[in-house]
Image (spheres, rainbow, N blue to C red):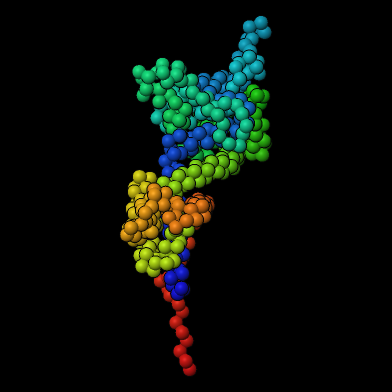
Amino acid sequence: MPSSAIIDLAIGLIFVFGVTAALSSVVTELVARLIGLRGAYLLAGLRELLDSGKAPTDLSTAKTDYEKIQEIMLGGQAPPAAPAAAAPASATEVAATAPPLTATGALLGGPILRSQGMTGQISDRKLTVEAGETGGLPKMTTDREGNLWSQRRNLLSYIKGSVWSQRRSLPAYISAGSFADAVIDLVAPGAAGQTTMNTIRQNLEALPETMTPFKPSLQALAKNAGDDVGRFRTGVEQWYDDHMDRVSGWYKRYAAKITLVAGAILVVLLNINALTIGRTLYTESTVNTAISTVAAKVSSCPKGESQQQCLASLEGQLSAAAAAGLPIGWGTVRDCREPQARCNWLEQRGIFSRHGNSGWQLVLVLIGFLIMVVALVPGARFWFGLLSKLGSLRSTGPKPATAAS
């Protein structure tokens, strides 16, 4: 087989790998939006950073939690002078008698974050993050009343109250600057731009001991900042960014599982078999050349393109490849299109062979599907990058021979 044909074969297979991986990624993004995955992971990440995931976080009480922390902070700054018999409770006593507070709820309930990246306020979300193991997506529940049968007359309201619907309405991103502003607003209320590190350190001491690791982490950052509020703010931002990098890793691992499942379903539904495609490209030079031409015009989804447009574009690319002769889909195989060929449904689909050895044929089909699923792991960006390099190599051609002296 000429070297150019081998390159065309590689281009054809990589083209199929890349388009299938891109289709799987688009489906993954659509699923992630449907179930509110980004907002859920952001909320889970905040809970682990601030509360270690040891206590449940009820978003409906977020604003109340913020107001209670503000009362503690203001009480710690200026305790009113009064007779001993009528002296108000100290900040520590208030914290001890008050219901358990969470730093996550208090921060999200503050004026800076309570409506950032969402419609309405965070306390409008009837969502509770349950206590549990950290390092992943915790269980989330909603206080939706009744069940599907009792709500059958108002199904729309029932759907809007579901966990997925509540998660979809959460912010998917909070900047480090906004997070640091919210922290300073929480621990130094009423400073009006005149916050000092002495005030911050004093107020941090007044925080309930149950707010861990929020309290000890901020105390360590305050100690390292000295008297520089700007340095403290930078430390809080870096603390947040470092943890969000971990949360991003959790999200990617979860999304990778969705991609593999979605890709496996697409591979089977569209009958994208790596062995069948490779055999066709190897034995039929016209199909090989046609697919190489189609692949030369293909690129991954541009950043500015919507998911629907990208999905339509990728479907068009696969359709063009099928029209060029690539064996994609569950049409009748060529062997069963011959005159007087008698094939049952499985033989027409290429799952069994009308010539015998159907067990071996089924094994080959499964291996071809498995190769396609494994090819999803590197991702579309990897395959399209490799496709671009091979396209350049193909267009460059062999190095011209040196003229004889």
Residue closest to the eye, 166 or 3: 3
Q: Residue 361: horizontal and vertical position, in percent?
A: 49, 55
Q: Which residue lies most toward the top here?
A: 85
| Horizontal relation, residue 99 to residue 316: left or right | right
Q: Residue 259: horizontal and vertical position, in percent?
A: 49, 45
Q: Residue 368: horizontal and vertical position, in percent?
A: 49, 54
Tell me which residue sits at (48%, 36%) in the image: 37
Tell me which residue sits at (53%, 33%) in the image: 43
User: Can the viewer see residue 203?
Assistant: no
| Vertical placement of residue 64 versus 259, above or below | above
| Horizontal relation, residue 343 to residue 110: left or right | left
Residue closest to the eye, 76 or 146: 146
| Count of residue discs | 0
Residue 80, located in which quarter of the rendered image? top right
Q: Which residue lies most toward the bottom here?
A: 405
Tell me which residue sits at (40%, 25%) in the image: 159
Residue closest to the eye, 155 or 322: 322
Residue 55, located in which quarter of the rendered image? top right
Q: Residue 150: horizontal and vertical position, in percent?
A: 41, 16
| Vertical placement of residue 137 versus 352, above or below | above
Tell me which residue sits at (59%, 40%) in the image: 243
| Horizontal relation, residue 319 to residue 390: left or right | left
User: Can the viewer see residue 161?
Assistant: yes
